[in-house]
Amino acid sequence: MDTKAVHERLTQKFGEKITGANLEVASPFAVVAVEAIEEVAAFCKADPDLAFDNLMCLAGVDFPKETPARMEVVYHLLSYPHGHTFSLKVHVPRESPALPTVENVWGVANWHEREAYDLLGIVFTGHSDLRRILLPDDWVGHPLRKDWTDPDFYNGMHVKPTPQMADRAMGGEKIGVGPFDFTPPNAHVAE
């Protein structure tokens, strides 16, 4: 099934819940209304002509300069039986990014959604275990947001190079970075 046929099938089934599409890009996609993503995902997997049995990737994208500012969740789907691919996108407000989980459709979404939550702060309602997956539990903020600024310290340790470390690195010295660098002057003390 080609991407045009996939899009037509989705618009026939869900009508206005499919709010947009672009089939002329490298990864053709349909935009799905927030409240419909779980239903559309379940259909994409169960419909025998679509048979998107694999959620290859789920990614979050930050668009702070859009009007209104928003985030986007992108679902990259693959059908092993048919060999076709397609993407779904959902737009959520940047200030309160939340949408239903799809982990009941594709189990692997559990991990992908935790990553999007950890790095972008996107909340997946109904998720069975929504907690950080890459950063420590007490980390503050979401580092893939475009307005993110690196903290100087985490639990008393440097998490980015000091000016002295940068000078040494510019001089050709091999140094570690972050909390794993124990070479002076980065002795994990306040400067």
Image (tube, grey):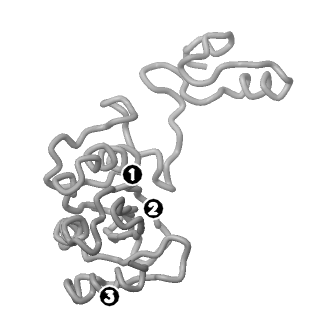
Question: If the image is split into quadrants, where does the C terminus sit?
Answer: top right
- Name the residue nearer the viewer: 87 or 79: 79
Q: CA distance from mark 3 to mark 2?
A: 28 Å
Q: Earlier in the sequence, mark 2 or mark 1?
A: 2
Label number found at residue 120: 1
Find disc 2 in the rendering and name its residue. Answer: 62
Q: Position of residue 66 (x, y in %)?
A: 47, 74
Label number found at residue 15: none
Q: Position of residue 92 (x, y in %)?
A: 31, 68
Element assignment for label 3: helix
Q: Amino acid at mark 3?
A: Glu
Q: CA distance from mark 1 to mark 3?
A: 32 Å
Find disc 3 in the rendering and name its residue. Answer: 8
- Taking the spot 40% from the left edge, 57% from the top edge, the residue there is 60
Left or right placement of residue 165 versus residue 49 in this view? right
Q: Are marks 3 and 2 in contact (CB under 8 Å)?
A: no
Q: Earlier in the sequence, mark 3 or mark 2?
A: 3
The residue carrying pointer 2 sits among few (fewer than 14), some (14 to 19) or many (20 or more) residues within 10 Å by Cα, namely many
Element assignment for label 2: strand
Q: Amino acid at mark 2?
A: Asp
